[in-house]
């Protein structure tokens, strides 16, 4: 059994792609399409890692990150930004905001899963 | 009280002013040499005759001893009139009372005054002369237009009527420094003005001269300019937002195209036959090509809209070159091309923006690898002849560029026809973007090339 990942993405095809790749690598995926949903899911399930699109309807990725970082039960859960805002400043801004890593869309299907796995806590990696 | 004696007569004769003695009936009794000179006559011609020969209009009714009468018109016997000032005193003599008039020609003073008034009249500003009590003593024609009062009405008014705070409010202690205040027009409207003060010493005392400039137009232009700036900022923000949205909107579908082509090619859903694999690779290559065009266009748009921030810092050129070479090594390896760096022992530190230098080098090295089928791509660092500029040269053993094409290749979407290949993934924007970035850095990119031997693109950066 793989790690448990929470995917937060509002475009259906983008979600399908990431979800498919992760499941193909034997990970368990929970899907959320808004930041609010994501925070609720994360608090209920405490995933091993969160993949968070920066542009979301309602609260955006930055606000969602702040809510996740503020939740008592979620300390130490890595959060990785995925965004189609790929201009230079966006990258720095995301890392400054406290994301553990930053990936741009289009994602590279060959390296995507590996890049996420590098941020998984050792325990969940063992399970994977 | 004087007694008329011959000694007194001698004194009279020697007096510096023109003096005329007149009896109560207005007949001239005596005059001195200065008076003869002033009125251009001999005393014999005048004595015993009416003083109106000399002062045709006479003196004002209230003129009397002990007073100085100004604005008198004297007439010299040659016919010329002149402005005069007359001091009167009563003298008692054995023959009866005499009114002694000391007469001074004030032509010169009058003409100096006239010049001064003329200068004030033609001044581009409204000018007010204000006395120590704050009362307006003098106003030029422009004051009438600015304040809506006739000049006669202005004189005698407190200056507060037209400059509500008075001149004290504009006296910043520094004479001549303009200060912006609100003046008041007769109709009650407020006029933005700039007031500069200076002091003027006059026989009647010290006047504060206030040059009052209507700055309504300037204010209007300032407001217009401000509004335009706000509009430009808004337009610039709209452009930035547009670029960000474009980036997002174009990448979202490409994510699915490139992503799912990838999963198919990774055979995650199942096996592919050779033709399916071949066709999917074409989709993948085209998708990636489209992505690089979009990336380049967005970069270019961002550079041209001024959205690229250049931060000059000392940049270690060798480290940047090493990073670029490391990131492009897989590309060179795949083509079987040697990729290396040739650097001197000394550290080369340029004053530049690290990211911009990196992007320029990536474009140049990427191009060099792309157009070279065999041989080597070498990045050479140098400070030629101890010159202040640091040169980073990217040399390849590609096909070279014909001289005729050398100035075309920096333009957007242009390539040398001799090297363009149908399989080539380039966007035709890399060199154009590099050139734009170099301009932002005040750096230059030059190229030398020999067909059949290769090309060298050289970036010259300012020394850090």
Image (cartoon, helix red, strand yellow):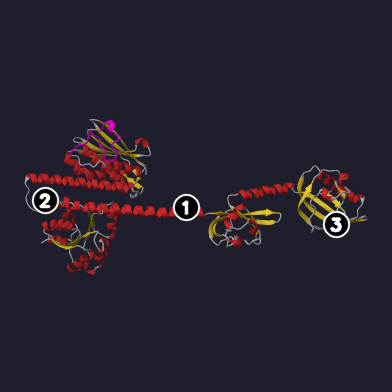
Please name the residue that numbered disc 1 is placed on: B221
Image marks 3 and 1: residues in contact by CB distance under 8 Å: no
The picture places residue B369, in percent across and down from the top left corner, at 22, 39
Q: Residues within 10 Å of mark 1 (few under 14, many from 20)?
A: few
The picture places residue B132, in percent across and down from the top left corner, at 66, 60
Quarter of the view holding residue B448: top left
The Cα–Cα distance between marks 3 and 2, rounded to whole angstroms, is 129 Å
Q: In this view, does B41 lie above or below B454?
A: below
* Residue B403 among those drawn in magenta: yes
Kindly state the secondary structure of the residue where label 3 is placed: strand
**Dot in front, 3 or 2:** 3
Kindly state the secondary structure of the residue where label 1 is placed: helix
The answer to which of B82 and B375 lies nearer the viewer is B82
**Residue drawn 58% across and 52% down?**
B125
- Chain letter for mark 2: B
Q: Magenta residues?
A: B401-422
- Chain letter for mark 1: B
Q: Which mark is residue A56?
A: none
Please name the residue that numbered disc 3 is placed on: B90
Please name the residue that numbered disc 2 is placed on: B264
Residue B348 is at least partly visible in this image: no
The N terminus of chain A is located in which quarter?
bottom left
* Residue A59 among those drawn in magenta: no
Image marks 3 and 2: residues in contact by CB distance under 8 Å: no
The picture places residue B87, in percent across and down from the top left corner, at 80, 54
**Dot in front, 2 or 1:** 1
Residue B230 is at least partly visible in this image: yes
The Cα–Cα distance between marks 3 and 1, rounded to whole angstroms, is 66 Å
């Amino acid at each position: 059994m793989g790690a448990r990942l929470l995917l937060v993405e509002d475009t259906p095809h983008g979600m399908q792609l990431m979800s498919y790749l992760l499941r193909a690598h034997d990970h368990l995926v929970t899907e959320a399409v808004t930041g609010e949903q994501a925070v609720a899911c994360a608090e209920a399930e405490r995933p091993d890692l969160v993949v968070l699109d920066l542009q979301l309807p309602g609260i955006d990725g930055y606000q969602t990150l702040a809510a996740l970082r503020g939740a008592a039960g979620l300390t130490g859960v890595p959060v990785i930004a995925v965004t189609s805002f790929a201009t230079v400043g966006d990258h720095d801004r995301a890392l400054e905001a406290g994301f553990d890593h930053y990936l741009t869309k289009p994602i590279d299907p060959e390296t995507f899963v590996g890049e996420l796995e590098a941020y998984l806590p050792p325990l969940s990696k063992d399970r994977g | 009280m004087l007694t008329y004696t011959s000694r007194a007569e001698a004194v009279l004769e020697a007096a510096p002013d023109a003096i005329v003695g007149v009896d109560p009936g207005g007949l001239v009794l005596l005059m001195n040499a200065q008076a003869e000179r002033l009125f251009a006559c001999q005393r014999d011609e005048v004595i015993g005759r009416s003083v109106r020969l000399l002062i045709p209009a006479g003196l004002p009714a209230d003129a009397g001893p002990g007073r100085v009468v100004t604005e008198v018109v004297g007439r010299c016997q040659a016919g010329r009139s002149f402005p005069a000032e007359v001091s009167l005193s009563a003298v008692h003599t054995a023959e009866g009372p005499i009114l002694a008039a000391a007469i001074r020609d004030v032509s010169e003073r009058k003409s100096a005054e006239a010049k001064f008034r003329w200068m004030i009249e033609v001044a581009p500003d409204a000018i007010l002369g204000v006395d120590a009590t704050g009362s307006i003593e003098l106003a030029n024609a422009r004051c009438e237009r600015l304040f809506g009062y006739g000049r006669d009405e202005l004189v005698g008014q407190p200056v507060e009527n037209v400059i509500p705070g008075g001149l004290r409010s504009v006296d910043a202690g520094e004479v001549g420094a303009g200060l912006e205040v609100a003046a008041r027009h007769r109709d009650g409207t407020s006029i933005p003005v700039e007031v500069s003060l200076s002091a003027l010493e006059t026989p009647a005392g010290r006047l504060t001269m206030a040059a009052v400039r209507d700055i309504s137009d300037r204010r209007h232009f300032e407001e217009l300019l401000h509004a335009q700036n706000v509009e430009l900022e808004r337009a610039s923000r709209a452009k930035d937002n547009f670029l960000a949205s474009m980036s997002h909107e174009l990448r979202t579908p490409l994510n699915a195209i490139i992503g799912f082509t990838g999963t198919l090619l990774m055979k995650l859903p199942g096996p592919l036959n050779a033709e399916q694999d071949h066709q999917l690779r074409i989709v993948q290559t085209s998708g990636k090509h489209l992505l690089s065009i979009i990336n380049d266009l967005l970069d270019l748009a961002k550079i041209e809209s001024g959205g690229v921030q250049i931060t000059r810092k000392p940049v270690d050129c060798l480290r940047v070159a090493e990073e670029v070479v490391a990131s492009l090594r897989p590309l060179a390896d795949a083509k079987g091309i040697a990729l290396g760096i040739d650097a001197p022992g000394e550290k080369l530190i340029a004053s530049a923006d690290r990211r911009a230098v990196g992007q320029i080098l990536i474009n140049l090295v990427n191009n060099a690898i792309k157009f070279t089928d065999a041989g080597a791509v070498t990045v050479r660092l140098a400070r030629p002849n101890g010159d202040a500029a640091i040169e980073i040269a990217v040399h390849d053993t590609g096909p070279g560029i014909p001289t005729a094409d050398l100035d075309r290749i920096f333009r957007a979407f242009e390539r040398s026809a001799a090297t363009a290949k149908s399989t080539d993934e380039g966007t035709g924007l890399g060199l154009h973007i590099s050139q734009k970035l170099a301009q932002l850095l005040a750096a230059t990119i030059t190229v030398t090339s020999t067909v059949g031997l290769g090309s060298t693109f050289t970036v010259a950066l300012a020394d850090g």
